[in-house]
Image (tube, rainbow, N blue to C red):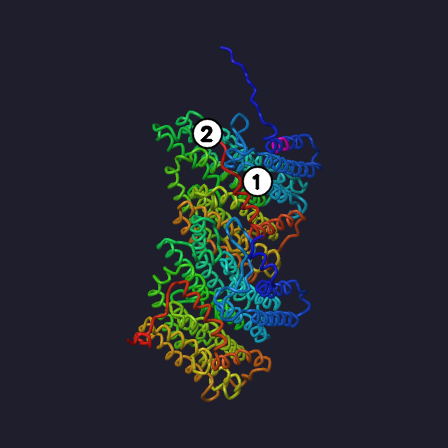
Amino acid sequence: MTSTFTSPSLEYSQLLPVLIVFAVALLGVLVEAFGPRRVRYPVQLTLTLAGLLAALAATIYVGVGLVSIGGGVAYGATAAQGSLAIDGPSVFTWGVLLVLSIISLLLVAERGLEGGVTAFAGQAAALPGTDAEREASTQGLEHTEVFPLMTFAIGGMLLFPASNDLLMMFVALEVLSLPLYLLCGLARRRRLLSQEAAVKYFLLGAFSSAFFLYGIALLYGFAGSFTMAALDEAVRERLDGQGLLLGGMALVAVGLLFKVAAAPFHAWTPDVYQGAPTSITAFMAACTKIAAFGALLRVFYAGLGSARWDWQPMVWGVAIITMLVGSVLAITQSDVKRMLAYSSIAHAGFILVGFAGVFGGGANGLGFTSLASVLFYLTAYGFSTIGAFAVVMMVRDAGGETTALARWAGLGRHSPVLAGVMAFFLLAFAGIPLTSGFIGKWTVFSAAWSGGAWPLVVVGVLASAIAAFFYVRVIVVMFFSDPVGAGPSVARSSPMTSAVIAVAVVMTVLLGIVPGPLLDLTQQLGAFVR
Amino acid sequence: MSLPRLVSAVSFPWLTVLGALPLAGAVLLAVLPRRTGAEAAKLVGFGVALLTLVLALIMLTRFEVGEGGFQLVEQYEWISAIGATYSLGVDGIGLTLILLTTILSPVVLLASWRDGHEGRWSVNAYVAWMLALEGLAIGVFAATDVFLFYVLFEATLIPVYFLIGGFGGPRRSYAAVKFLLFSLFGGLLMLASVIGLYVVSARAGDPSYLLTTLRELPMQEWTGRLLFLGFFVAFAIKAPMWPVHTWLPDAAAQATPGTSVLLVSVLDKVGTFGMIRFCLQLFPEASQWASPVVIALAVFSVLYGALLAVGQDDIRRLVAYTSVSHFGFIVLGIFAFTTQSGSGSTFYMFNHGLSTAALFLLTGFLVARHGSPFISDFGGVQKVAPVLAGLLLVAGLSSLSLPGLSPFVSEFLVLAGTFTTSVTAAVLATLGIVLAALYILLMYQRTMTGPLRADNERIRDLRAFEVLALAPVFLLIVGLGFYPQPMLDVINPAVATVYEQVGVSDPVPDVPVTTAEEVP
């Protein structure tokens, strides 16, 4: 038997953003291996920043060049032998992911708050409380490996929502997850908490990956192929093997819902959000959610869209549970980061409401499609949430960040501007008008209602009312409570963190008052290409 | 370029400027350096509010009295993807409430010259939030786009929240949160309805949030009813009606008198205003369907509020409960579906704003002078503070609708109109007037008359600026009491237009009228 190897044909120009990101990550590893310690931080920061900016430019280039299919029904084509889909939704997700990654990178690189070093462990291998650790910290060591690790994660995130092939999607999932597990455990302060978070995230993440993989296997058994197109065709034409389809669908859903932090697969979220270095939490809260929702939408709309009568009830249930669990449990939290974690669960629920509408435009093409609404919501939420975590980074006392809510009392008197900014983000999360959060809620709820899911909208509205309570509680603590003891102080950060907060505020205002351009863009992305 | 856009581009944007002026004042105060001092901040605030009033009066001359539709219309594209436009306009109803807002704002700022110092923040913040509230309230009353209305409606919560929570009594934080949560709950229910309107409108063709477009929208019976409920509950919380009124007494007892005035006299009117503007016009069928229940709730609010007012010892809670009762009258008039009662309700909103402002400010002066809000801590105050006592009596009498004072006219119109459609409701509501006499006169008797209590001797009479601040309010109460026609001329055509759109006509008198032609 002779086997000939045919090299795959790759559309390099279409894949440019992904290729740039991975190339930068690899270069970063080389810098770690050969660069002297002194120059690593500036080199890594410059390299990563330049790489992400180049990838963003490449994304715009790819986006402009997308070819219209069927008179604007969709744009783009599949690439890399059909394993990736470079279409409107993919390119939009890439753009948003890269922008948010760039501003998260500025938080990761912040050195002003810890006295000249980053917020990552000096030497992760040194056990907490040992001489080795003390030595590492007196020498001012820092792990600049976080930059390539983060870049690898970004590369995985770019691949994940663009995967047109379930196997590719699994690879992307692992590429994005593994560096994140590591990054979670690298906090300089409260290292045991951080390491515990990393282990929890790793174990549960591995568990959910296994579910996902098993689901892929079942779907392969059903369709005989990994691609979305084959899956879609099989769903429409095959009558036998429904057990495989349902089982595979459910298991794939578990894997993806775990990543978006939907209940009942949310248990990791509060622990990991609390334990991870705050800049990484910000990065995960914004970017992982976007990538995972992008993948979720692609699998269920492009691959399993014709079986939606089977999965829609499941999404309804998950959406309701997620909204209620997120908003009710958030009320009892006494730690700001945990509160924001439950808030992110609640927001996953609101996004699932838009997803559950499965609304593809009215008879005359009017109304917000589910896809457009979810993408808009993710963008709006991403900016606000990174901003909120950036504020958390700056509120400190002698022991590092003070995330206990009680210690935030009187922040409004100490630093009215920072507390005001935080209040503004919280109001955006609560969906108060003139913020992006309001327009986001409006879009997902209107997509759901247009798709006939108005009971979900009612539950969503009630959950929003509950959620408003705990956002308001933080505002009360900051502005109306008297400080305990010396009270919190706000550290002077480098201009990077201030810039991130400024960008987040501006975007939250802009998307709240003039959301028109972005809304139009999300509506013109077209459908998924398979 | 479409025609309305061209027209509005030429004419002066009165409403935008009127709303933007106080907002600009608020921004100016926020950036004003702290060292310029509290007096400067108050002067700036008062000046801006006065300027807004002058502008509103000039705008009044541009208003065509006798027209029922929207005037001074401005319309620009805003978020085309969701059919939202920036469109403003006033009819007689909106104009009345904008006038009320612009009259009361300088009054409040002058009268609360000595407030805001003991608050958590500087006086600058106090004045700035007040101006912000004025600007947003003007926008709410002028919005003719449902989406814009909703955005401004929710945005007003922020200044009020900080006004209650930042400046006021010891339990102000609790009161502020309670206010915010009640309002947010209502607002979110309304959001569901606002989204529903979009969906209905998108299915019918072109999605639009313009009031004039939505009015023509065909709607299924139950869709309309459910959407109506979302709006109505939000407005009932705002108004406030029994059983969702409980936030008001707490807020009024903890807030400064100035905040209470803006909250109850101006902002709560958004509730009843919204019922006329949105519930009735967007959902005429549902409004009629719901009217028996709404009338029952309104009558209950009238009696319940009055009864609880009789039993209050805290003078500020007393005034709050009288408002629950008065808002019952206003809602009753709106849902009685006669032009007479509807005009009465609209005029009632204006008058209630004036008389409640007077009551809150005067009781505020009283409480600030003695340091206790309880009626039982006062006695014989008229001996030491005759002007305060006299004005409080007039304000009280206006609250109980004494003939010759303006609230009488509106209350009479409401009851007379209601009588033609529902005798029972009218009769029961009349009991509210009797109870009003009880709570006002009892309060006056206990605090002002009788022997002077020993610890009341140091209560000093009103200062000149306090009398000056209240003077316009009392002039209007008395003036419109004797000659209400100018206001009614503004209000009547607008209300008639609304009820025409709803499709109700006033009941015809039962007695057959024979005219000359019919005689064989």
Magenta-drawn stretch, dominant element (helix, strand or loop): helix
What residue is drawn where x is 35% and y is 28%? A241
Q: Is residue A175 left or right of residue B398?
A: right
Q: Position of residue B518 (x, y in %)?
A: 31, 74
- Above or below A225: residue B377: below
Of the numbered discs 2 and 1, the one sitting upstream in the chain is: 1
Chain that bears disc 2: A
Mark 1: give few (<14), some (14-19) or many (20+) Cα within 10 Å: many
Chain that bears disc 1: A
Q: Which of these two is toward me, A15 or A476?
A: A15
Q: Position of residue A236 (x, y in %)?
A: 39, 31
Quadrant of the rendered image containing residue A104: top right
Residue A23 within the magenta-colored segment of the rendering: yes
- Disc 2 marks a residue whose amino acid type is Ala
Question: What's the mark number on residue A97?
Answer: 1
Mark 2: give few (<14), some (14-19) or many (20+) Cα within 10 Å: some
Q: Which residues are magenta?
A: A21-25
What is the tally of numbered marks visible in this picture? 2
Q: CA distance from mark 2 to mark 1?
A: 26 Å
Quarter in which the C terminus of chain B is drawn: bottom left
Q: Position of residue A35 (x, y in %)?
A: 69, 32
Helix, strand or loop status at disc 1: helix
Question: What's the mark number on residue A229?
Answer: 2
Q: Is residue B169 visible?
A: no
In the picture as drawn, the residue positioned furthest to the top comes out as A1
Q: Position of residue B512 (x, y in %)?
A: 30, 75
Residue A155 within the magenta-colored segment of the rendering: no
- Above or below A461: residue A36: above
- Disc 1 marks a residue whose amino acid type is Leu
Helix, strand or loop status at disc 2: helix
